[in-house]
Each structure stands twice: as structure tokens, then as C-alpha cells.
Amino acid sequence: MPDLISPDAIRTLFSRAMSDMYRREVPQYGALIDLVAEVNAETLAADPDLHARLAAAGELERLDEERHGAIRLGTAQELAQIRRVFAVMGMEPVGYYDLSVAGIPVHSTAFRPTDGAALATNPFRVFTSLLRLELVEDRALAERAAEILSSRRILTEPALELTTRAEAQGGLSASEARAFVAEVLETFRWRGEALVDAETYARLHDAHRLIADVVSFPGPHINHLTPRTLDIDAVQRRMPGRGIAPKAVIEGPPRRRVPLLLRQTSFKALEEEVRFRGASQAGTHTARFGEIEQRGVALTPKGRALYDRLLAGTRAAAPIAPDGTGAQAYVDTLEARFAAIPDDADCLRREGLAFVRYRAVPEAAPAVADSVEALIASGALVADPQVYEDFLPVSAAGIFQSNLGTESAAAYSAAASRAAFEEALGAEVPDEMALYERAERDSLEAALLALGRPDL
Ligand code: OOG
Ligand code: NI
């Protein structure tokens, strides 16, 4: 039996290899990484409190490593295989996202680490979408697409073998892990060789650009990798200076002193050369793009309901035209409406709007304390905001739409189908809320124990 390395170490190898590959494939990604590193360093230098808070919560180490990617899969078999591959790296499916309401024929989950230690080591996540051919009206075209997809194999033989070995052994050795990462990288590499001829591509593209992107190529090329910034507004402002054109508005909540959930912005997909089957001349496809994110505190179901209501109200009151007209009015409306959520970490906790993670500072323990609140007031019990580790369906739809160029797409009438997604995956997708709840509860229990007050 070989010496096995941890799934966290394999995930870090993989996340770095993906980043290196994407840097070579999409030079603008490298420019964005450099810009984000610069803004993060400036933000930390200008805000010693933030620096101290992130350091104490163990969040500083993960910052430079932190990124998420996105892939789009064609079949249930592909999704089931990818689940096994990600499991080797300690990534589990979390959450169900229905994008059909925004006119995008997919449903999705996020593969990510779930326990606190693994998240602190490297929170690499992959937003993974599965094409829903049943939503395509042109049934003949849907059948043709299914046929094309049925013959492709997205994993190399060695990748499959090493996945099976990891399952049998309960992990991989260091050398096996290196081989595994190199093989799995092949699945996500961009290949300009289409599986289809130009005419089939055009028909798929006319049905939906996303369908052409999923079906026409040999595998699920990684379509973006997203670094985490501490100040998304600063990065957005400086992007044009680096030759990068961002979308009109930042998705998600407005700028706040205590950042909420997730804010994201992206730059448009690149036009890339493609060789279609049987064609003498190269064609083009727009596939890959760039994105940045700023992560804030995870909201409780109560906080999330408030967020969803305020966002929906803003979108109805101040819609943005596909050409970006109305962006400023939208931002103003968003900021005004979000005043309904307190912008103070302690208020958010006390009002049950945000999830926290507790830690003990025994040196500060008071002689007497008759409640959790008293311990918090004394400084012996600290409540750090829990980082939101997931995605937001409305934001994800906005990101899809801006890089697909389908801002005005009408919703599909079919309902969400979590059950069908779980069947394809071969597993249930846990609700993300349960994970934050458990982390809060477990951390409180451990901190009270450390303070000698398990009775509270
Ligand atoms: C995924 C778009 C969603 C996010 O960060 O919300 C996304 C895709 O375009 O495949 O990446
Ligand atoms: Ni993304």
C-alpha cells in the first residue's frame, strides 16, 4: 500500500495546474491575476483591521490560492464521472442551481470542499453545469446533439484508471496524484478541433450558443477561472487600464462595509479559432472569458430571503438594457434598497441574518459570564463571519448571459428538476445552508468547551 497524500493536497496541485494552463491559454487571465494581487495587497496595507481579522480567522493564507472555475457538461454519464474525479480531490457537489428561468438550458451544482479545515487549506470550487437537451424545442436537433455527445469520452483512460485506483485505495500517492492531475487537466484543455462540421455548429448555435459550446467540442473546456479580490470595485475600475473590458455592472449585492455573499464581474469571451470537420478554412467560437469575485459573509435563510427580495425589487424597478444603459440608476437603487440590511457584523449576527464561526480567546475569559452574549462582549468568544462559499443563481445567470451575449433570452417554461439532476449525478446535492449551520453550531460547541463553559 503506497503512502497516500491528502485530497486537499491533490486539490491544490490541480488548482495550480489549472491556473498555469489557463494563463497560457488566455493571457488576459494572467493580467487579471496580477491586478487582483496588486489590489489585494493595497487593500490589506490600507486596512490593518481587515488584515488582522483575516489573519486571525485563518483566511489570509488561502487568499492567493483562491479561485473558482466553471465547466459545462453534456450528459448524465459525464456528470457522474466528473463527480468521481472531483471526489478524489475532496470536492463534493453542493447546492442546486436552476438556470432555465433565465433562458439558459442548464442546471448546475458547485463542486467544493465542505469542511472548515479543507476550505481553509484551499477552497477551490468548480461551478458545473449540465446541458438540458429536453428543453430544446427542435427535437431533431436535440437528438443529433445527443448522438454527438454519446460518442465522446471526456476522460483519458489513465484518468479513469487513477480515479478507480483512488476509490479502491482510499486515496493516491504523491506520484499517482501528479499523474492524475496531469491526466485530468486534459479534460479541461481548450481544443480548437470541433467534433462537428460548420453547418452543424451553426444549427446548434442558432438553437442556443450554449448548446454549440457544449456539444461541438471534444470536452468540457474550462471556460473561466476566477480569482478572489478584497475590493472588486477597485479591480473593476482598473480593468480598462489593463486592456480588459468588464461588463456594465457588478452582479450581486452592493458595496458594503461588511461585504455580503458574493459580488462578481466578468469580461467578455474571447473569439477563438476553430477548425470544423471537413472545412478548409478556420472558423471562430467564443468560449472562454474572465471573472473576478469578492466574497462576503454567508447569510442565513432569513438573511437570504431578504437579499432575494431586495435584489428582485431592484431589478424590477431599475432594469438595465442589454447595451448597459441604466447601469448607474440600477446601482443607486440597489444601494438604497439594501439599506434595509444592517451594515454591521454584530447586528447581522444578533438579528440572525448572517452565519458566523466562533473561536475562543481563553486569555480574555471573564470571571463570571452567564450567557454566550456576555462571553462575546468580554472578547473571550469571537464570532468571525463565515465566508460565503457558494454561488448565486441570479448572478450566475448574469455571468452566463454576458459571455453568451443572450441578455434578453426568455425563460424556459419547464420547471427546475433537482431530482433529474441528482439522478444524473448519482448522488444527492446537499443544501448549502445545512453546511453553514453545522459549522456555526460545531464551532460554538468547541469554543465553549475550550472556555470551560459547555453549560452555556
Ligand atoms: C458559469 C457561469 C456562472 C458564476 O461564477 O456564477 C459562474 C458558466 O458560464 O459556465 O461561473
Ligand atoms: Ni464564475
Image: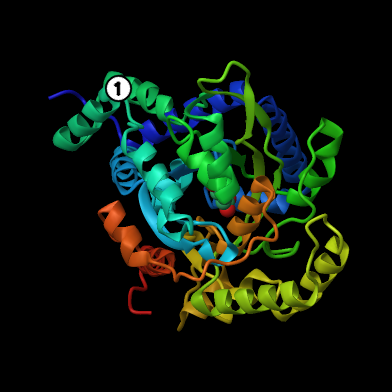
Q: Is residue 208 visible?
A: no
Q: In the figure, residue 243 lies in which quadrant?
A: top right
Residue 406 appears at what percent x and percent y? 67, 53
Q: Is residue 10 above or below residue 138?
A: above
Residue visible at 44% across and 71% down? 415
Q: Is residue 255 above or below residue 176?
A: below
Residue 330 appears at what percent x and percent y? 81, 67
In the rendered structure, the answer to whether residue 430 lies left or right of residue 216 reads left
- Whether the residue under disc 1 has CB within 8 Å of ligand 2: no
Q: Is residue 411 visible?
A: yes
Q: Quadrant of the C terminus?
A: bottom left
Q: In the figure, residue 352 lies in which quadrant?
A: bottom right
Q: Which three-letter amino acid code belongs to the residue tagged 1?
A: Ala
Residue carrying label 1: 174
Residue 369 appears at what percent x and percent y? 47, 79
Residue visible at 48% across and 25% down? 17
Q: Is residue 246 above or below residue 330?
A: above
Residue visible at 74% across and 74% down? 314
Snapshot colouring: rainbow
In front: 311, or 15? 311
Q: How many marks?
A: 1
In the rendered structure, the answer to whether residue 128 lies left or right of residue 397 reads left
Q: Helix or strand or loop: what does disc 1 sit on? A: helix
In front: 378, or 151? 151
In front: 401, or 447? 401
Residue 13 appears at what percent x and percent y? 42, 28
